Image: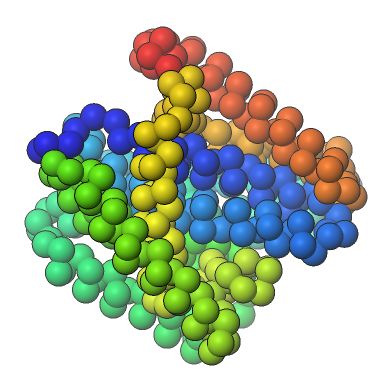
Amino acid sequence: MKNTGRQLEIDIAKGFAIICMVLVHTIEYFYNGSSSAANAVVEFLGSPFAAPVFMFALGVGVNYTKNSSPEHYIKRGCQMFVLSYVYNFFVYAAPYLSIYFKTGDFEYFEAAVIEFSNVDILQFAALAFFTFAIVKKFNWNKAVIIGYAAAVSLIGQYLTNTVELPEGGLSYVLGLFWGSSEISFFPYCSWIAFPLIGYIFGKELINTENKAGLYASIAKVSIPVYFAMMANAAYAGIDFGQLTGEYQVSYYHMGIYGNVCLLAFVFGWLSICYLISMFISEGIMAYFIKLSRNITKIYVVQYILIVYTYVFIAGEESNLFFIEAILAFALVFFLSDKIADIYISLRPAGRKQLARN
């Protein structure tokens, strides 16, 4: 291994990803949508810059972790899977359950069940860890990994487009694997390509002696491919949530075309982040490193703040104008960042991390 230690371009990309995630979630919950142009810009920032980067970086990180045994990833996957539904209960379902018990309105109980069944990034991360346990156990090479990612994406695309299930229990369970339900936001088949290709890239990154040359070569291919695929999608009417301005179901349930296009975007964006890392100040870089380390904690906290505010204070209404919604985003992000810092500071290992930051 020649290129160990922190990879600053990954930290920049992950830090920007969590900023974009908090932005798009705040806008989706609270903005009244009066400007379609503003909404489209925010949704774009919360699309290719966010989840694809986060999941790609998850795969890169597998190469840099100290413990990468199959048993480790099985354990992490089990923990994450259980915690993801604990999270669903307390963050998404509990507010509606409390209203149900207060009012007796059964619609709120139904809403709680639906919210509990959300297939979000945390459920997907658990399935990704299980996948890496298999990759490690059987020592898959690049060809096998790429073939598996392509096959799974194609299978998920076929099932999403051909199998119709009534909204309910079975569709919610199968939504872990493909887009069988509208609350399946990150089904395995649509998204596993990102961490798997990230894992392959991470192997190249950790062994490279010439990062500048690596990223220059990547940029020459990935950026033209991304724009060519976007232009072709616009011409041919290929919908994977990048051109309609809605960025919803077709984005979350993308097929192999969307995977390839957004992977090209991620590669190009990382190349740009590498260039940025060469000029960014130490103070700003330190902040992005902190965001990168705390990305999961910030993600969890921001949704607690957003959902509870939306249900109990806003009365499930999106009434803010754009400037007001941006101010709400700034407040949510500031609080999420600070609460994550406080949580880490309460742990012995966290105090050392904050000192490093």
Instruction: Out of 188 and 115, give the one closest to the viewer.
Output: 188
Left of 201 or right of it: where is 354? right
Measured as percent of width and height from the top left, residue 315 is found at 88, 46
Q: Residue at x 53, y 19 (%)?
A: 341
Q: Is residue 341 visible?
A: yes
- Residue 15 position (above or below residue 356): below
Q: Residue at x 23, y 29 (%)?
A: 5
Number of marks in the rendered image = 0
- Residue 190 position (above or below residue 317): below
- Residue 26 position (above or below residue 15): below
Picture colour scheme: rainbow
Left of 209 or right of it: where is 255? right
Q: Residue at x 84, y 60 (%)?
A: 35
Q: Is residue 350 visible?
A: no
**Within the image, what quadrant is residue 2 found in?**
top left
Instruction: Out of 2 and 24, give the one closest to the viewer.
Output: 2
Measured as percent of width and height from the top left, residue 201 is found at 24, 54
Q: Residue at x 43, y 17 (%)?
A: 357
**Within the image, what quadrant is residue 4 found in?**
top left
Instruction: Out of 158 and 255, give the one closest to the viewer.
Output: 255
- Residue 326 position (above or below residue 254): above
Measured as percent of width and height from the top left, residue 10 is found at 37, 41
Measured as percent of width and height from the top left, residue 91 is found at 64, 41
Image quadrant where one finds the N terminus: top left
